Image (tube, helix red, strand yellow):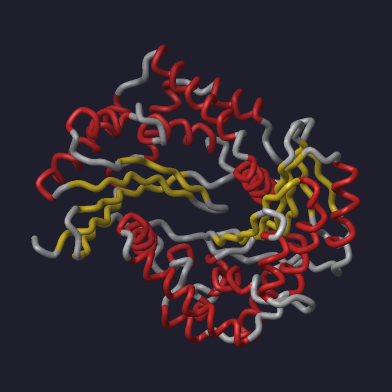
């Protein structure tokens, strides 16, 4: 573990994780809980996310406006998010308000009351959020793809739920879910800032270690293998949107970082990715085209997404498959591989500047893998990756026999 990353486990089972950085007057901290939308039961779809909203609506000693003003009044930020497997409540703030942030986040996490009157109002807020995502084809395409890909499994549930599920939630449902899922042994309190670890540990102990020991192992059912599918959905759109998907690696797989490198070369965020250069830059067929890999505790997913005019769709799709097949059948040259490795490591170094993202990354690593890999460890893993290994992974992951595809087709076709 990096010499500037420290861990400590309190008597009640909560793990403290601190990344000490020098020279910054801004700090970040948050509770990361190993519980998300995949941990909902059949009648709870959208509940984990709704709880995330309701955590800000009142505790045993605070009203909603007290919670919202507590950090805003000092120029800080307070926020939360829900994913398939995680819930996080976090804050970014001037360093001198570290204890204020810790106390507030602990109060929200441990003492939220989920008042019924606030619940009624927040339903409307989340309903608007659902509508907003439905109006965004790139967002809704991903949700619709996962629903088909993980058919009859909770990984396919929409994190936001539905208007119908929202209307069924009562305060007692939220309390029951928190009691079942928020346990100290599946929680990490992570911090990033220049404070020394001993001071961080002492301050956090006042608010974290006061809660009783609670442990529970969340039972997660591994999704069954997905049968290949090609599906179209008609939408009121001008363009066609498409997502291709293949099974990838789970988050503790030994090839985890290598497959991120592979994805980075194919369609990562850089403008010189193969998909961007071979389709957008060469032909001008689309504005957005990219690939992604997502890892869960027991499975993974590799995707390619693009949007284009109807007249260019077949050409675009053909070119995507052409780039994938090239990866599968032709090894990268020594120079190409060296450049790709250098680019990837450089991107990692750049990402270190976003300390809020660093907070999330190290906390998730500790929850998922029990440790935080250092920059040197990841860079070394990337450096020893060979062209043959990348080609083998490309053939394993992007196997056309397992291709899944979902497209939005304009209704005027």
The one of 96 and 257 positioned closer to us in this rendering? 96
Can residue 174 be seen? yes
The reply, left or right, for residue 293 in relation to residue 145 is right
Q: Going 54% across and 25% down the picture, which residue do you hit?
A: 345
Can residue 1 be seen? no
Locate residue 180, reporting x and y percent. 68, 74
Q: Going 61% across and 34% down the picture, which residue do you hit?
A: 353
The one of 278 and 123 positioned closer to us in this rendering? 123
Q: Is residue 327 above or below residue 304?
A: above
Q: For residue 199, which quarter of the picture?
A: top right
- Quarter of the image where the C terminus is located: bottom left
Q: Going 31% across and 22% down the picture, which residue do you hit?
A: 330
Locate residue 168, reporting x and y percent. 50, 86
Q: Going 37% across and 70% down the picture, which residue do you hit?
A: 131
The one of 123 and 31 positioned closer to us in this rendering? 123
Locate residue 410, reporting x and y percent. 16, 60
Going by the picture, which residue comes out furthest to the top?
335
């Amino acid at each position: 573990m990096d010499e500037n990353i420290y861990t400590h486990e309190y008597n009640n089972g909560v793990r403290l994780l601190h990344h000490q950085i020098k020279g910054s007057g801004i700090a970040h901290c948050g509770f990361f809980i190993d519980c998300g939308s995949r941990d909902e039961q059949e009648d709870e779809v959208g509940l984990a996310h709704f709880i995330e909203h309701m955590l800000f609506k009142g505790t045993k000693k605070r009203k909603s406006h007290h919670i919202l003003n507590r950090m805003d009044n000092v120029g800080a930020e307070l926020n939360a998010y829900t994913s398939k497997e995680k819930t996080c409540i976090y804050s970014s703030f001037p360093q001198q308000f570290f204890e204020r942030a810790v106390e507030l986040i602990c109060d929200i996490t441990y003492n939220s009351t989920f008042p019924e009157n606030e619940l009624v109002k927040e339903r409307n807020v989340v309903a608007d959020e659902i509508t907003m995502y439905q109006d965004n084809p790139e967002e809704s395409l991903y949700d619709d793809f996962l629903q088909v890909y993980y058919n009859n499994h909770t990984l396919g549930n929409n994190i936001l739920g539905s208007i119908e599920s929202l209307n069924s939630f009562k305060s007692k449902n939220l309390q029951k879910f928190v009691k079942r899922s928020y346990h100290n042994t599946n929680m990490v309190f992570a911090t990033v800032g220049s404070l020394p670890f001993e001071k961080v540990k002492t301050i956090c102990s006042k608010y974290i270690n006061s809660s009783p020991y609670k442990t529970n192992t969340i039972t997660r059912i591994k999704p069954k293998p997905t049968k290949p599918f090609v599906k179209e959905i008609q939408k009121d759109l001008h363009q066609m949107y498409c997502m291709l998907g293949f099974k990838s690696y789970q988050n503790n797989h030994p090839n985890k970082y290598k497959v991120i490198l592979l994805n980075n070369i194919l369609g990562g965020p850089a403008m010189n990715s193969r998909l961007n250069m071979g389709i957008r830059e060469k032909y001008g067929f689309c504005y957005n085209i990219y690939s992604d890999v997502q890892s869960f505790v027991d499975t993974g997913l590799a995707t390619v997404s693009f949007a284009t005019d109807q007249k260019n769709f077949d050409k675009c799709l053909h070119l995507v498959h052409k780039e994938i097949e090239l990866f599968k059948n032709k090894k990268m040259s020594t120079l190409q591989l060296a450049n790709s490795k250098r680019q990837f490591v450089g991107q990692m170094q750049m990402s270190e500047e976003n300390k809020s993202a660093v907070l999330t990354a190290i906390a998730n690593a500790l929850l998922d893998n029990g440790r935080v890999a250092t920059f040197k460890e990841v860079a070394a893993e990337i450096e020893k990756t060979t062209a043959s290994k990348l080609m083998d992974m490309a053939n394993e992951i992007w196997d056309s026999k397992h291709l899944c595809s979902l497209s939005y087709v304009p209704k005027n076709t």
